[in-house]
Image: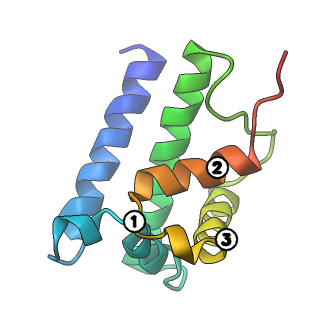
Amino acid sequence: MPKIGARIVNALLVAAVIFSTAPAQAAQEDTSGNQLYELCSAPDSTWQSAVCEGYVLAIDDMLTAQHMLDEQKGICLPDGVTREQMKDVVTSYLRDHPDDRQKWMFVLASEGLVAAFPCKKP
């Protein structure tokens, strides 16, 4: 399977895990930034923290693939950026934008990563 295809499949699998392990609540709340903030704010080494990290990595894969298809979009990670650092970026973005947390978690995680790791215009 091509690299981009494999990344998208991995992203979809992570998303499936997130929504199968999240507490059963209304669909809007399950996919909101509030739910993601709760997961990402959990102590390290908990299942919630692991789900957050997996979700953030899936978003990273999707945004990186988007940049590979269109250089004006997506994110460009500098060498050495860790999974924990990406999780911290998204958690900080959610903490700093509480008035937007009702939005879809994918949108908020994407906004946080794009703000932190924009691609330089050619």
Disc 1 designates what residue? 51
* Nearer to us: label 3 or label 1: 3
Picture quadrant of residue 34: bottom left
Picture quadrant of residue 79: top right
Whole-percent x, y for residue 117 in the image: 74, 43
Above or below 21: residue 65: above
Q: Judge from the rendering whether residue 95 lies leftward or rightward of residue 55; answer left or right.
A: right
Please state, as top left, top right, bottom left or bottom right, where the C terminus lies in the image.
top right
* Of the pair 93 and 22, the residue shown nearer to us: 93
Disc 2 designates what residue? 113
Q: Amino acid at mark 1?
A: Val
Whole-percent x, y for residue 21 in the image: 23, 69
Name, please, the residue furthest toward the bottom. 43
Above or below 8: residue 104: below
Cα distance between the residues tagged 2 and 1: 17 Å
Q: Amino acid at mark 3?
A: Ser
Picture quadrant of residue 103: bottom left
Above or below 32: residue 25: below
Disc 3 designates what residue? 92
Name, please, the residue furthest toward the front. 99
Above or below 66: residue 108: below
The residue at 64%/49% (across/down) is 113
- Upstream in sequence: badge 2 or badge 3: 3
Cα distance between the residues tagged 2 and 3: 10 Å
The residue at 55%/80% (across/down) is 44
